[in-house]
Amino acid sequence: MTIRAKATATSAAVGVLYRGHQFTVHRSSGNWRHIADKTTGITGWASGTYLYRDVAMCLD
């Protein structure tokens, strides 16, 4: 899944969150989550549709 600079699907990509990567959620905006990928250290926005909240893991 693409990690974006802003909480929109058309925002610039800043990285990729791969299936199984764990992350920390810093805040939310609608269905978007501002995250920090614990594996790569990349921070940005990801769609909540593809995130598994209970264990903070990417499902896509």
Image (tube, rainbow, N blue to C red):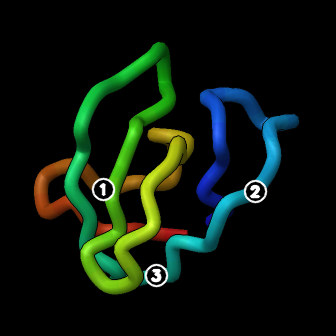
- State the quadrant of the N terminus: bottom right
Asked if marks 1 and 3 touch (Cβ < 8 Å), the reply is no
Give the amino acid type for the residue marked by disc 2 in the picture.
Ala
Q: How far across and down, in percent of the image, does residue 20 sit?
A: 35, 84
Q: Secondary structure at mark 3?
A: loop
**Are there few (<14), some (14-19), or many (20+) residues within 10 Å of tag 1?**
some
Q: Label 1 is placed on what type of residue?
A: Tyr
How many other residues sit within 10 Å of disc 3, few (<14), some (14-19) or many (≥20)?
few
Look at the numbered discs 2 and 1 and tell me whether their residues touch, using CB distance below 8 Å: no
- Residue that appears at 28% across and 28% down: 27
Q: Position of residue 60 (x, y in %)?
A: 55, 70
Q: Secondary structure at mark 2?
A: strand
**Is 37 or 49 nearer to us in this picture?**
37
Q: Is residue 36 above or below residue 58?
A: above
Direction from residue 40 to residue 22 in the image, left or right: left
**Residue that numbered label 1 is attached to:** 52
